[in-house]
Image (cartoon, rainbow, N blue to C red):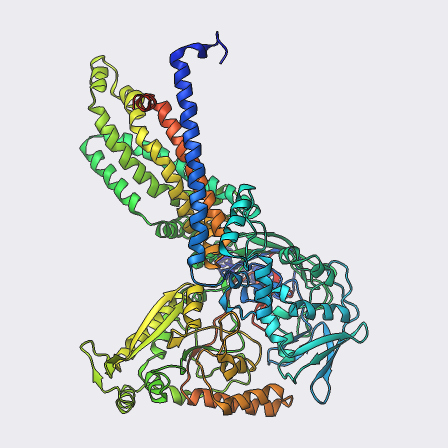
Amino acid sequence: MHSLTTSRARRGLGAVGSAAVLALLITACQSPAAEQSSTPVAGGTLTYASGDAEPTCLDPHVGGNYPQALIAGQFLDSLVSRDADGTVIPWLATEWSASDDGLSWDFTLRDDVSFTDGTPFNAEAVKVNVEHLKDPATESSTGYLALGKVESVEAVSDTVARFTLSAPDSALLESLSMPWLAIESPAGIARGMEENCQAPIGTGPFIVDEWVKQDHVSLVRNDDYNSPPADAKHEGKAYLEAIEWRFIPDSASRYAALQAGQVDVLDNAQPDTISAAEKTTTLAHIDAPRPGAANRIELNAGAAPFSDPAVREAFIRAVNVNDGIESLFFGSAERSYSPLSSAESAGFSEESLFDTDLDEANELLDSAGWTERDADGYRVKDGERLTLDFPVSTNQSIPAEQSLFEQIQATAKDAGFEVRLSLLDLSSWYGVLAENNYDLVSAPYTKVGPDVLRILYHSDGIVPAPSGYFANLSQVSNPELDELLTTASETSDDGERAALYDQAQEIILGGFHILPLYDQQNHFLLGTQVKDARAMPTVSTPTFYDAWLAGQ
Amino acid sequence: MTPGLPDSNPARRSRSRRSVRWLLVRLGGAAFVLWAVATLTFFAIRLIPGDPAEAVLGGPGSQASQETLDQVRRDYGLDLPLSIQYLHALGRLLRGDLGTSYALKVPVTELLGAQLGGTLLLALAALALAWLAALGLSLWSTGGGRFAASLGQGIELTSAALPHFWLATVLIAVFSTSLGWLPPVSTGGPTGLILPTLTLAIPLAGFLAQVMRETLLDTLDAPFIVSARARGESERGIRLRHALRHASLPAISLSGWALGYLISGAVVVETIFARPGLGRTLLQAVTLRDVPVVTGVVLLVALVYILMTILTDAASRLADPRLASAEATR
């Protein structure tokens, strides 16, 4: 737009023939724009379009899933945060220290912060929050699991909260940085679940004003805000006056609304719209992979045929993943060769383990006894076809990913594997997993830090939770791996901890238990009028504390 | 009825008595249908594998502890025998209480009350638009010669077959992205209602026009039309005053069905245009296995459907009094 005005001005002035006037005009034209892009302006309402599910409760202590995390960061602060390098940094807690045995942690808290209902933030509030998370009546799962080793919290003084643990937990700080463990007003919690779900009260830069179900949540600025995380760009209250947080489930309408200027930011951008947006000058893209585990296909080693390592290796040799990712994701997803997200510094990657080699796949299957083929070209042993059941959750896999699975199905066929893809709704999908009716599965899991490996690959994770769900879907059961993961979770020395996680990942990859695909996709598209918005380095949720709207 | 009033006329009295009886029978039938729907929904949802307590906790993936599951079972009365739970649910229903949403933790009546208006507005706007379009289309296509007839038939068939999600995407691409005239997602204001209404109305208009045109053509050959023509009435007058009344009869009785169709179409339209409403509530509730909300929406839709059928039957009786007398002689 700007270059258009400039070139028009240039043509018009050519007739006048004064180069001096021209130069003057161009500078006059450009200087406000240059100023506009660097100095934050206060005011305005930002409209955010979420394509994730609408939360059922705005209090992230209840349940604890990603849609809640997306919005909770706007009105709740946590005790600690992470910077872009993954280092834990101060937020509501300024300092912390652990006892030598790792069973007692003291957190020093800021003494100048209040919740938006006027309740002071102090050690007692931290205690109330941990108790709230651990209370069965709260129905917490993510926060509850993350606090598994925390027995109690004691308010030593107003500004010192002491955590007592049942076993050392090297992931405690990472857990506390997650929005699902953010700190809420004790008075707000005391109102009871129904009211607290509608409008949780925190110390955050915005306040929940109104929640119109299936439409939007109105957030208004907290004018007394003084507690940004240590890596924020400014201090004091936010620039934006308000945020309208809309729920727009259809990805095409969401993108159309962004193009039409009806919304300023959207999440869950699909590969085709990311590629379209990158060709424009009016839209920007934030690629913020989620921490914890990478997206991967787990090979169920708990039952035939994948109980045979040779068959697992043959499958990984047979399938061609890279071509599919390239063609279906328009360059928006990069192939991963690690169990951990690229957002995790502890990630260990081994590309050579995942070369495609059809001849080798065939040899491996021959040697494993799958020598015959039936009329359809699938391998058969003792009258049984080499069939792999692959239930796919349509709520969790985007269309591009479902197409990728179809390509994997097609390439696996060349080696004689029959991959049976079934598209299921979330409840049915959990159902077949709980019944152990799967050979391949792709399940997202988000947790800050490499301790996610313990949740996903420790043999304890094969034992189902009372709800029937078990996190170790590849059903890896390896005493050496268990030992490494347990030791790592109790080791406070960073170097030692990293070495242990490296070894653990080598075992997981070397045993052909998983097929890593790419990072858990988190893509935001923004109009270029939105400045200084970023994703939090904790679980990659957006934050609009530093954000401002150009042209206000 | 007091003697001396117009109702002392025996013929009229018997007609009004017939009407009251007709209404009582219909209302009784409605109550029965609602009870059947409530019972079927209650047991059908329980037949789906999965623990309702897990649904409360956000699905089987919640990894909830045994303690939490037990707590939820007690809180929601899920530890009671199924028959007791059923009686409790019926008892609540009689008091107009639909229970509390598992997922949203708010009373279902409150939730549906907030969503009903938006969906009804959308459905009625679409119904009205579809009626107007169908009337215009059928009058034009039956009165404009062979070309108009076959073109009209083509338009009817095509629009009746258009899937909502496809139509919605095309309308957004044309009117929002290319022309920039209308917002792609709901604004809460009247402009945001135009595209969703068009999406629902176009296929329905095609369908209604098919029915209307057929009846219109049949009627135009009927003896009373021939005699009207013989009396020298203008063709336009005949079509508007005589034929249309007959042609609208089957379309009126279809309108009850159409409203049900529109509410189910609202699931797609409300999702695409990000409008709050019953359809979107139902979709979300099914995904989350939110039993009380699913039951509530199903009952509400059944109720609207039943009321509309009664209303359209009454309208048909007004448009064609022979229907009422036919019942009396049966």
- Residue A134 % position (x, y): 65, 70
Q: Residue at x 62, y 78 (%)?
A: A174
Residue B256 image-quadrant placement: top left
Give the residue at x 62% y 62%. Answer: A59
* x, y percent for residue A106: 75, 80
Viewer-proximal residue among A248 and A47: A248
Question: Could one spot residue B95 in this view of the protein?
Answer: yes
User: Along the line of sight, which residue is nearer the eye, A510 or B162?
Assistant: A510
| Quarter of the figure that contains the C terminus of chain A | bottom right
Q: Looking at this view, name the residue that lies furthest to the right.
A: A157
Residue in view at x 28 percent, y 22 percent: B236
Q: Quadrant of residue A97?
A: bottom right
* Percent position of residue B81, x then y: 51, 57
Residue A30 visible in image = no
Count of numbered marks: 0
Q: Is residue B168 left or right of residue A101?
A: left
Residue A125 location, x and y as percent? 74, 68
The residue positioned farthest toward the top in the image shown: B4
At 27% from the left and 40% from the top, the residue drawn is: B156
Direction from residue B146 to residue A11 in the image, left or right: right
